Image (cartoon, grey):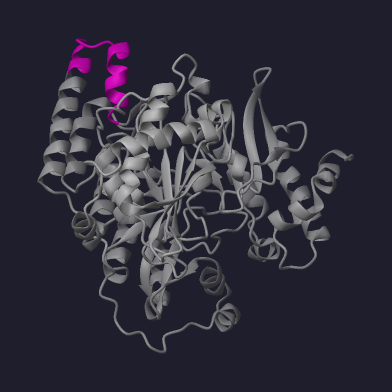
Amino acid sequence: MYRYDEFDAAFVAGRGAQFADQVNRRLSGELSEDQFRPLRLMNGLYLQLHAYMLRIAVPYGTLSSRQLRKLAHIARTYDRGYGHFTTRQNIQFNWPKLKDVPAILAELASVEMHSIQTSGNCIRNTTTDQFAGAAADEIIDPRPVAEIIRQWSSLHPEFTYLPRKFKIAMTGSPNDRAAIRFHDIGLQAAVNAAGETGWEVWVGGGLGRTPMIGKLINSFVPNEHLLAYLESIMRVYNRYGRRDNKYKARIKILVHEEGLETIKGQVEAEFAEIRGGILTLPSEEVDRITTYFAPPAFTDQAGSKVDVAYQSIIDPAYGRWLDNNLNAHREPGYASVTISLKPVGGAPGDATDVQMDVVADLAERYSFDELRVTHEQNLVLPHVAVADLRTVYDALVAAGLADGNAGMITDIICCPGLDFCALANARSIPIAQEITHKFAAPERQAEIGDLKIKISGCINACGHHHVGHIGILGVEKKGGELYQITLGGDASEQASVGKIIGPGFEADAVPDAIEKLVDTYIAKRHSVDETFIQAYRRLGEAPFKEALYGTA
């Protein structure tokens, strides 16, 4: 894991002291809320419906046990005993008191964490595949490059006040688990004809009120020139991105309106100017940072394996967990373990202080002191010996964290919605809770298989509803809450945007509507191996629309 150098430490400490002064001036009345607003947003502090919310950065989703324990401490000391993990691999605290925020930031700085650039019109936290550095299908660990991007983008003097917020995602695998095609810039590891490793660069993706799939702007950029290429894109966006209309300010609109070839020409012209200059990455610096992400000291686990079929017979709950919550590791005898934060009836992405402490202990003892936050609002222990799986599972059972539902219908992405967010039109959390109750039976979930439901409480799409196999969008209609359903979204390398299937539903009708869609899928799939998204692409919307509305 990366460790702060002297610059990082001084930078974070200086920002914390600066913001503490700004908070004191706000509390004394010297600053009005309007004057304070841009200052707090630069430090990840939002004003939501009922209280302030503090969003804390988790760069490329990687945490140590020490850092997670600090988050648990903050939850019980300064908040209401829990935190909410987000789709940007960050964590939010929903109830901090303004007077306590400087103390919270000081606590974070003591474990090399901060809340800088988690809001505002700047380059946000770069996200990655949650199994980076561990996945068996990985070409390259993207986290060293993500760290370089973090250093480059932090308080970049040209890009502090962009037309709109800017998000970068990257994956080192050909199997996209980071939704890179739905980001302003997406980076996917690639190998050229000479066998060199570099990056495909995708640009202009995004969700919100105008969902768009990113376009491939360059099929191969070497590591040494990646920052120069990213800077070229940012300069073009900063120069031409619209500032007169926030709804049309994202780079996706610029690419759409000007056309990819026009934007590519501008980017290449910038790149020709700065390529080979100070943004060229020296190989020794890349190597230095890469050493922070060196694989841990794995031990020989020869012969270690688990018989999932057998375990499913003697202990069905453990068998389900093994079947659904493990990801293949590049090191024989190890696995990556997904810890579901999606219990039946729970708020997706929430973890209590006690649960965070338990996960921190497990990471320290059984995962080389490392864990990950996923963009699907779960946690991951990336390096667990197969021989330790049962011990880890038993500890998770005791903590209420052993749901074996990763990737299943109850593993729902969900934004905070109208329960917290001042921008929301409708509640999201109660809808997710009711759907999980509807499909709580493990046998039912197993019958359905891989199905991703994603819920947003407004068109800003923080719940990624556009890319859910089944997406749910809460809207306001005549003072009430109504829920539109979309089908066919996919955030993987086979990216697609879901299509609204028909008129919306009242809140209490949504779970039954989802059940009708699921029953239609099961009745019409070719076999148990055909997933929901595969069946939808083969069948089209007609049978699903008929199931919901009685007509195609």
Name the side, left or right, on which 72 lies relative to 127. left
Q: Nearer the viewer, residue 340 or 382?
A: 382
Q: Main secondary structure of the magenta part?
A: helix
The quadrant the C terminus occupies is: top right
Name the side, left or right, on which 351 lies relative to 492. left
38, above or below 118, in the image:
above
Name the side, left or right, on which 324 lies relative to 194. right
- From the top left corner, tell me how far across and down residue 388 is, in percent: 37, 77
| Quadrant of the rendered image containing residue 135 | bottom left
Q: Nearer the viewer, residue 463 or 74?
A: 463
| Quadrant of the rendered image containing residue 41 | top left
- From the top left corner, tell me how far across and down residue 184 is, in percent: 46, 37
- From the top left corner, tell me how far across and down residue 107 is, in percent: 18, 42
| Quadrant of the rendered image containing residue 151 | top left
On whether residue 209 falls in the magenta region, the answer is no
161, above or below 151, in the image:
above
Residue at 76%, 49% (x, y): give it: 517
Is residue 397 among what the camera can see? Answer: no
Residue at 38%, 76% (x, y): give it: 331
Q: Which residues are magenta?
A: 25-43
- Marks counted in the figure total 0
